Image: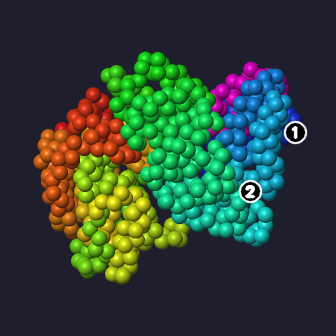
């Protein structure tokens, strides 16, 4: 630890000690000294705001809080202090709103729950007051260890949260009343770290002890959904719905999970039921818009998104949903409204991210390329800071496929695996034209389109091993017996059947499956594989402009996406070498130049007769769940080709990362 850090910690402790002893003027002076050294010091800003409030310097307190909200818009304690300040100034409505924000970002803030209960009761909002009071009582009953875990988790100190939580679970027996809450919190920490399999196991185990715990089951559904185990997630949502079919929470959850498994009619019916009770709820209006978009009801989707924005002007999800239609153009009034929201210091993190990407699209459509790139870069920088993506780690992971999955290994397993010819894998990078290829092929009478299925990625993750830090994949492939490989292939066919509509062949268009072509070949040797490839600059910049619902962290930086593309090309060359003729490569630009020729080429590779419907793909009525859903419902066009060129002055990092693949 350097001397500068030691000095800061000593000053911070001095400020905290002064505050605890009621010497608020000394505490404020110490906090100001810290802020002189670092104006963005969040802890010092918080202490300064508290001290100024106690000294009744409300204007100064407000100023410190505004700076703190700008630096950390989702810091729950800052919003709790804003509530305390508003109460001190006699502004009860403002206080209530601040306390509500505080508990949204940190549910362990007992004072915020208590004040919400009191203020809501005073306003005659009895039901909401009772909910807040129950939450306050729940927090008050938590042992101090789990209260600390909840605080650390809310404030992003995951390692400390995990350390305390694991110690609590080791030292308190399962019969302890709070053991279940400890398991739930450890699962939430696991989800934040991306250790989804362990999180699912913890929540499933906890439910065996507390099957009636609603929050536990909601968290379990969330874990299943994140692992893209959509069928199980819907089963669990059904159990909640059966308890109380009139509950908007349970209706909304079942609607979302129904959509995930392709039951769009039921999903829309449930959203309508929710919105009958909560007609201005922005989250459900936006979710309904997503459902309508997926089924091709574009105008109705737009109306639902706009209704969400009308209900809550800073609802970034709805603003970005409009941009993500790709074919939507923002009006001048909408552009001004987004700019106004983006200028707010208290805008939440994800609302700021969503609106930044939406502003990028709005400015791009107007030819305002400098402003557009600045907005895209802001959104990407925010997401990049949030993720733990490492381009070096990804390069190393992909290089292991080169080293381990050799021609000798594949030949030694010849004849193994499940012989089903059903799957057609379309893989590559996102934004490479895979949705167009899927729409063309799914227009054939013998092919079902599904979605980006998670099964291969989940299998590869499972093969890594269960122990923390263990990674036996892909080396473990050499150890798998023919019987094991056959079972893994048979399980894939069985587990994906829920997404099919009865055709003999079906498409899995998870792009990241290119990392696991060796695994796919070993368990499904008769599967077909199509590499959807697009011009590197078009593909990478299109990915950079896209905010993905989850995953694809490599797209949130020009260097990162360029390196990923280069690594992908290198790995595909390896697959061509060890599995010659196995993969059909289809270039997006060739499809634009010769739709019929490339369609016939794909159908010949698949062993299917030509059908005219494949050329009329834009007339095919099916749900499309990717960012290209509106584009593939139009005749083929070149609108996305060369879209990077107006942004070329800002794309030097991307060209450097692509190396020889970049244009001269």
For residue 13, which quarter of the picture?
Answer: top right
Q: Is residue 510 visible?
A: no
Kindly identify which residue carries mark 2.
146
In this view of the protein, which residue sits in the foreground, 532 or 262?
Answer: 262
Kindly identify which residue carries mark 1.
21
Where in the figure is residue 659, as x and y percent of width and height? Answer: 25, 46
Query: Looking at the image, is 58 positioned above or below residue 465?
Result: above
Query: Looking at the image, is 261 positioned above or below residue 313?
Result: below
Discs 1, 2 touching: Cβ within 8 Å: no
Q: Which residues are magenta?
A: 53-80
In this view of the protein, which residue sits in the foreground, 168 or 660?
Answer: 168
Q: Residue at x 60, y 32 (%)?
A: 279
CA distance separating discs 1 and 2: 27 Å
In this picture the colour scheme is rainbow
For residue 423, which quarter of the picture?
Answer: bottom left
Residue 56 within the segment the image draws in magenta:
yes
Where in the figure is residue 413, as x and y percent of width and height? Answer: 28, 79
> Chief secondary structure of the magenta span?
helix
Q: Label 1, secondary structure: give it.
A: loop
Q: Earlier in the sequence, mark 1 or mark 2?
A: 1
Q: Residue at x 40, y 58 (%)?
A: 499
Query: Looking at the image, is 203 positioned above or below residue 375?
Result: below
Query: Looking at the image, is 320 positioned above or below residue 7?
Result: above
Q: Residue at x 73, y 47 (%)?
A: 108
Where in the figure is residue 371, as x and y percent of width and height? Answer: 39, 24
């Amino acid at each position: 630890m350097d001397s500068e850090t030691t000095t800061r910690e000593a000053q911070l402790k001095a400020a905290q000690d002064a505050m605890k002893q009621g010497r608020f003027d000394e505490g404020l002076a110490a906090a100001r000294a810290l802020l002189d050294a670092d104006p963005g010091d969040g802890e010092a800003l918080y202490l300064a705001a508290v001290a100024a409030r106690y000294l009744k310097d409300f204007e100064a307190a407000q100023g410190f809080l505004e700076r703190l909200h700008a630096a950390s818009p989702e810091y729950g304690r800052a919003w709790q202090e804003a509530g305390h300040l508003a109460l001190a100034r006699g502004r009860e409505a403002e206080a209530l709103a601040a306390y509500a924000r505080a508990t949204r970002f940190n549910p362990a803030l007992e004072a915020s729950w208590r004040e919400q209960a009191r203020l809501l009761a005073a306003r005659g909002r009895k039901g909401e007051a009772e909910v807040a009071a129950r939450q306050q009582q729940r927090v008050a009953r938590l042992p101090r260890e789990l209260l600390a875990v909840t605080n650390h988790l809310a404030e992003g100190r995951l390692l400390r949260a995990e350390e305390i939580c694991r110690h609590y679970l080791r030292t308190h027996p399962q019969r302890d009343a709070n053991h279940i809450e400890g398991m739930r919190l450890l699962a939430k920490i696991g989800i934040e770290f991306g250790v989804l399999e362990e999180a699912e196991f913890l929540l499933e185990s906890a439910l065996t002890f507390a099957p009636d715990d609603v929050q536990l089951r909601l968290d379990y559904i969330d874990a299943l959904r994140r692992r893209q185990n959509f069928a199980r997630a819907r089963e669990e949502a059904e159990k909640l719905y059966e308890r109380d079919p009139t509950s908007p929470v349970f209706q909304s959850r079942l609607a979302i999970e129904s959509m995930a498994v392709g039951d769009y009619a039921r999903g829309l019916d449930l959203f309508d039921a929710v919105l009958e009770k909560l007609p201005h709820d922005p989250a459900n209006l936006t979710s309904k818009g997503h459902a309508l978009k997926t089924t091709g009801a574009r105008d109705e989707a737009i109306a639902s998104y706009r209704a969400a924005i009308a209900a809550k002007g800073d609802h970034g999800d709805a603003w970005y949903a409009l941009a993500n239609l790709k074919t939507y153009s923002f009006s001048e009034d909408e552009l001004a409204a987004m700019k106004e929201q983006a200028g707010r210091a208290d805008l939440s993190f994800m609302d700021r991210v969503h609106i930044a990407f939406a502003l990028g699209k709005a400015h791009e459509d107007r030819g305002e390329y400098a402003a557009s790139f600045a907005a895209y870069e802001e959104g990407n920088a925010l997401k990049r800071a949030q993720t733990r993506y490492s381009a070096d780690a990804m390069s190393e992971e992909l290089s292991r496929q080169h080293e381990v999955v050799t021609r000798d290994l594949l030949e030694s397993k010849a004849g193994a695996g499940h012989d089903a010819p059903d799957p057609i894998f379309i893989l590559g990078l996102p934004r490479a034209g895979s949705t167009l290829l899927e729409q063309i092929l799914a227009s054939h009478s013998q092919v079902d389109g599904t979605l980006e299925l998670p099964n291969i990625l989940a299998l590869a993750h499972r093969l890594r091993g269960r122990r923390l830090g263990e990674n036996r994949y892909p080396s473990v492939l050499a150890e798998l017996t023919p019987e094991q490989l056959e079972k893994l292939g048979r399980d894939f066919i069985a587990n994906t059947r829920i997404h099919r509509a009865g055709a003999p062949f079906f498409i899995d268009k998870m792009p990241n499956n290119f990392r696991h072509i060796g695994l796919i070949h070993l368990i499904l040797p008769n599967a077909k594989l199509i590499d959807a490839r697009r011009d590197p600059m078009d593909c990478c910049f299109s990915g950079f402009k896209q905010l993905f619902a989850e995953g694809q962290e490599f797209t949130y930086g020009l260097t990162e996406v360029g390196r990923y593309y280069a690594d992908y090309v290198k790995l595909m060359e390896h697959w061509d070498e060890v599995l010659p003729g196995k993969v059909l490569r289809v270039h997006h630009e060739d499809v634009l130049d010769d739709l019929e020729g490339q369609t016939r080429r794909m159908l010949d590779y698949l062993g299917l007769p030509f059908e005219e419907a494949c050329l009329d793909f834009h007339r095919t009525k099916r749900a499309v769940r990717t960012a290209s859903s509106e584009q593939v419902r139009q005749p083929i066009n070149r609108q996305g080709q060369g879209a990077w060129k107006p942004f070329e002055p800002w794309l030097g990092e991307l060209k450097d990362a692509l190396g020889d693949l970049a244009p001269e």
